Image (cartoon, grey):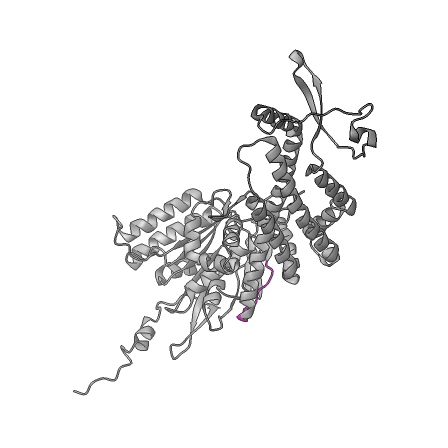
Amino acid sequence: MKAHLLFEERDLRFEIAFSPIKGFAVTGPELPPRAGELAQDLGLADLLRAMAGGDALLFDVAKLVVFESLTDPREITYRQEVLSDCLAHPEVAREIYSIAVQAIVGEREIHQPFGKYPTGVMRRAVEVLGLFVGLLRRLRRIADDHVAAQGSRAFRTLFTMLREELDDEYFRRIDEHLARLKLKDGILLSAKLGKGNRGVGYVLRTPKARRRNWRERVGIGPRSSYSFEIAPRDEAGGRMLSELNDRGVNLIADALAQSTDHILSFFTLLCGEIGFYVGCVNLHEQLRARGALTCMPVPLPSGDTALSFQGIYDVCLALRSEAEVVGNDANADEKPLVMITGANSGGKSTLLRGIGLAQLMMQCGMFVGADTFCANVGEAIFTHFIREEDETMTSGKLDEELGRMSEIADLAVPRSIIMFNESFAATNEREGSEIAHQVVEALLDAGIKVIFVTHQFTLADTFYSNGVEALFLRAERTEDGRRTFKFVEGAPLPTSFGEDLYRRIGGLGATAAPG
């Protein structure tokens, strides 16, 4: 059985282990190069914590899926359909997740026999199967109750499979088998004599319940079977009998162990895949509680150059802030460069993070923080943000920025997306602008989309004056110096209005002393 809630034709590559002492541990493929930089620059820790809702397993699953970006719009749309069902019926997603977690935890809490002797393996497998059958019954009930309400192909396929493969006849037969495998009537074996009169060809048989007649009970007349008892102190005889039991149940024990592993694998995949959507539901509920709107984005192929949105905002800022966040609109379709300039503290970095988060969330199949959002997928996503001064650095700040840029250049492929935030500003404006201009030109020539936040007028004006196909956004500022955190299309200005900030802290606005 396969869940296929994240991919239509393959499984998510991961494993979930549980220990009663250490809890859950999720392992999967290595995160993409520079994932740590991306997480730091976009503030993904807040996003993942909101998705987890205090559940460490959900945090790890969300981290794994968010960083494994999809580049096929059809795969993104497939997930969006599943997510829409989960948002419409969150109780169903949470119950399925709870069942899968109970299966993983319950299997580990069932006592493991010392040594892998067949009788012990079989007894444990029967107990585990009993647990799994109860949980599969609950899944079957969910499928019966909700199959008609699901609009996604994934849920319809999953629920139809559960109803067809886990029908009433299946449960009746498995209950019978489990009852027999508890061996309450003892073990009945058959064997043949081999070389040296050693037993070969051991087969576990189904005991036939029958009543002995009175002659057999009192030991009179012919007997239909013969038996003997091992003396309580006959240790060698006891070991031999145990070995006979193990030979007879060995094949059954192996088959049962494989069955439990197969069902556990299904529950593990189901746990991870539905867990991602439970995390999305958790995030959606927190944003809705803050009055922040969301939408399902429209993904386009990486060959298109598309980026348009209405009401976009920084999701992580909305999670942290008690105040209402400000949304912004823009249309950069057919424009491979977006240059964001304007007043200091006008929200440039916040807008950039909002765009970056929306791009990343779209490419893992999530909703985004906006009224509308449409963009081409990126074959890879990178960020290059300014860093705080590090006293441990052995070289200058500009060297550190250039080093990071070199690493990104080695990893970037055509149709990637790179977001810059005040990059190459560690030197004077003339040199910094020239470095940035050459870097951006080279990236555009390589077919890479660039979104660049800068306060350097020389850099922005160079692109604007040369008529480069780009969208120029400028942070809005009222005449009295107030920041609205809105952005408008417009030419770069030669000032970032730093004096406004100086006035706000009392510098130029202080009353002059007489004299």
Q: Nearer the viewer, residue 346 or 206?
A: 206
- State the residue at coordinates (35%, 67%): 494
Coordinates of residue 40 in the picture (x, y in percent): 41, 55
- Left/right placement of residue 391 relative to residue 56 reads left
Q: Main secondary structure of the magenta part?
A: loop
Describe residue 510's horizontal placement relative to residue 237 as left or right. left
User: Which residue: 57% across, 51% down?
Assistant: 304
Residue 5 versus residue 348 in the image, above or below:
above
188, 41: nearer the viewer: 188
**Observer able to see residue 150:** yes
- Start-end of magenta stretch: 290-297
- Residue closest to the eye, 254 or 384: 254
x, y percent for residue 89: 66, 61
When the figure is inspected, residue 277 is found, relative to residue 485, above or below; the finding is above
Q: Is residue 206 left or right of residue 466?
A: right
Residue 206, picture quadrant: top right
Indicate whether residue 212 is drawn in magenta.
no
